[in-house]
Image (tube, rainbow, N blue to C red):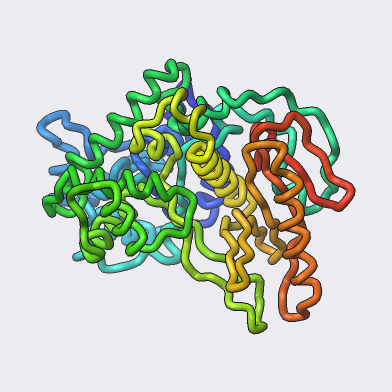
Amino acid sequence: MSLRQQEYRNRLVDTKINTMLDAFGAVAVDGPKWCGKTWTALNHGNSVVYVGDPAGNFQNRRVAQLDPALVLNGEAPRVIDEWQEVPALWDAVRFAVDQSTQRGRYILTGSSTPNFKGVMHSGAGRIGVIRMRPMSLFESGQSSGDVSLSAMFDHPLESRPTGEVTLSSLIEHVIRGGWPGVIGLSQNAAREVSEGYLSAVTHDDISRVDGVNRSPHRVMMLLRSLARNEATVASNKTLKNDMQEYEDDALDEKTIADYLEVLRRLFLVDEQPAFNPNMRSSVRVGKMPKRHLADPSLAAAALGATAETLANDLNTFGFLFEAMCERDLRVYAQCAGGELYHYRDGRGREIDAVATVPDGRWAAIEIKLGAHQIDEAASKLLALQRDMHDDPRATPPSILCVVCGMTSYAYTRPDGVCVVPITALRD
């Protein structure tokens, strides 16, 4: 019996989950709270157990703790929601999968990574793991999907009008974020949701994940610093110095590292790794990742930003806009079986985003809010491509693209650089 919810909006990750259910005995869907994991899992499941259900004094959790195998019985695929509350369920699922040749028996959803003390097996070969993120603009209906990122690798971009875009609409997309539950809410209500989300993280989740008490005030300090450094390569030392500048109560680097690790385990910090284009020359390629909060709406909430303040501070909004684009690009690249990176080298050359596909090809992508910035972005991309063509040990990009906010056309420039509005992009 299908558990699909009537109001469910199809997600791009659905196709990947179907493929993984055909390949593995179980699939684990990880991601931050409220990004839609449970409803997506139900869309593929035929029975479910909610480990965190408070009914009967948390009866499901207590049963799972006493004998994890008892909650595994049910029509396949069996959804086990918030499995991390009883980490022993991982081994129970792995063991059950080992006893059968049947594929697609279980779907596990989790909004944090548990301490794996007592968990005996990684699940490799038995449990496939996929990361789920908040909705892209295409999934939430804010992008027309006229331009496919994956199609650009094999077919020339066809020029087309894509509709007018306003600054106020882009700001609203950032403040709303990609949370399925805010669709249909007013902008002010959506902002309240993000603020409430951060409050729950700082006062509950940050300590409950491993039972260690942490200061809500200090966690919020770190979240604000991450928001101020959104979409940048910021070391722990940079975060420390930033907090010293803006806050009275400084954190040392060891504490920052501890807090960051817990935020990663809650899937609230997303790292965009550095890219190395097979370059074995003397060019030193940066290795530090860019850090993002799970959704740009959280960064906006951490900064106390409103539509009015962002409209009057386009520098800050530019970073939040870049973060939104990189959230979407990561979702789209994942659908194609690729990854999203950034590029930075010792010569001072930087590229905002690098989207890869499994055969090794890659797209160099600059992200710009305004159309007046397209020429400058294209020049950077072309210069990098020329340098890599001249170096036989480097793999040059297959696509040069500027993802733009304030433009109403998708087109290819005479120099070969593609220009695509973020509100027209899809996987």
The N terminus - image quarter: top left
In percent of the image, x 69 and y 43: which residue is there?
A: 373
Q: Is residue 125 above or below residue 368?
A: below
In percent of the image, x 76 and y 71: which residue is there?
A: 387
With 33 as the anchor, is 273 left or right in this view? right
Number of labels in the image equals: 0
* Image location (x, y in percent) of residue 240: 29, 58
- The part of the image, by quadrant, that contains residue 406 is top right
Q: Residue furthest front?
A: 245
With 9 as the anchor, is 408 left or right in this view? right
In percent of the image, x 25 and y 43: which residue is there?
A: 220
* Image location (x, y in percent) of residue 50: 27, 36
* Image location (x, y in percent) of residue 317: 51, 36
Q: Residue furthest right?
A: 414
The C terminus - image quarter: top right
With 407 as the anchor, is 268 left or right in this view? left
